[in-house]
Image (cartoon, rainbow, N blue to C red):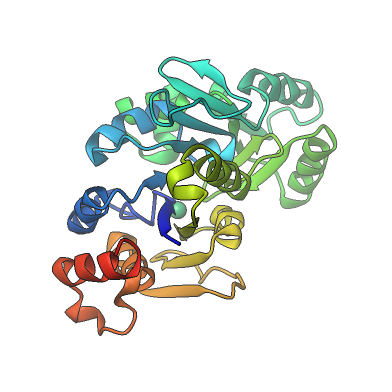
Amino acid sequence: MTTKVLIFTDLDGSLLDHFSYSFDKAKPLLALLKEMNIPVIPVTSKTRAELSVLRRELDSDEPFVVENGAAVFVPEDYFATPPSGCISVDNYYCAQFSLSRDHWLTLLAELRVEFDGEFESFTSLGVEGIKACTGLSDDAAQLANIREFSEPVKWRGSDSRKLLFVQKLRQAGATVLQGGRFLHITGACNKGKALQWLYEQYQNLTPSEGKSGRFLTIAAGDGDNDVDMLQVADCAVVIRSPVHEPLKIEHENIYRTQQTGPDGWVEGVSWFLGAAERPLEMNSIEYLRKKLRSNFYG
Ligand SMILES: [Mg+2]
């Protein structure tokens, strides 16, 4: 029986440094994983437009999950047969787990009547407002605003009014996720459901690999919106955050990193790939290559 590995990863604060957005420290390990045909699948709150830029920088041809699990995009030629329940969008098969952004904008427009002046959204802020709220560059703010399935909301009212606002959104069928700066309004989706769906596609559509064994899933993340994804993975890498409290999560196969960002990512992923018995400072790509061959691909 052969076991193949799938790595699902959050981006900001995990594979990418929380402050600089750099992933330089992870480049040697990413190159090794590519050489070994181990997919590294981005699972992020970012948009497809943001991912199209990042995937080029990451040199990634793998599927990816956008807007906190609202949709999975699989490159058209990735599997020999199309994944189930998808629509074709540009050069991708898209599995959609949320209604469109327009649906959530209509709902927010209705709530404006009752909560006038108490919230802004990406749409009402516009690119200039998004830049002011996030510190993003002009280009980055534009890409972040090309949303398809969700709408970030900046709450300006009191905490008690916010509870009421969130309650009304939930009653109307929205999922409301508290992010670092924004409330994210979307459908009944999360990163865990997206991982599960993609895992099933790998099992079903790569018979020579999936059916003869099973895929081992490793998930890496640093935030509350990663908990669902970490929970459904075989192995959970919790990346230490430089800005918030340790993540609250129980998992029978968990590794909490000592380092943050891409350093922590390399530390945690290496640990599960077979370098667990080795002191961290002795980890090297050559050693990992040997361990991967003997543990998974021998
Ligand atoms: Mg994160």
Q: Position of residue 245 (x, y in %)?
A: 51, 70
Q: How many numbered discs?
A: 0
Could you tell me residue 208's position as x and y percent?
A: 43, 45
Query: Residue 14's image quarter?
Result: bottom left
Q: Quadrant of residue 41?
A: top left
Residue 194, placed above or below residue 13: above
Answer whether residue 196 is visible to the viewer in this image.
yes
Image side of residue 245 versus residue 174, left or right? left
Indicate the quadrant containing the N terminus: top left, top right, bottom left or bottom right: bottom left
Is residue 155 visible from the viewing direction of this image? no
Point 18% across, 72% down: residue: 287
- Of the 4 image quadrants, the one containing the C terminus is bottom left
Q: Residue at horizontal 76%, vertical 31%?
A: 115
Q: Residue at x 29, y 59 (%)?
A: 262
Residue 274 position within the rendered picture, expressed as x and y whole percent measured from the top left? 33, 73
Q: Residue at x 43, y 14 (%)?
A: 90
- Camera-side residue: 149 or 118? 149
Nearest the viewer among 180 and 233 is 233
The one nearer the camera, 122 or 216, is: 216
Q: Position of residue 225 (x, y in %)?
A: 57, 52
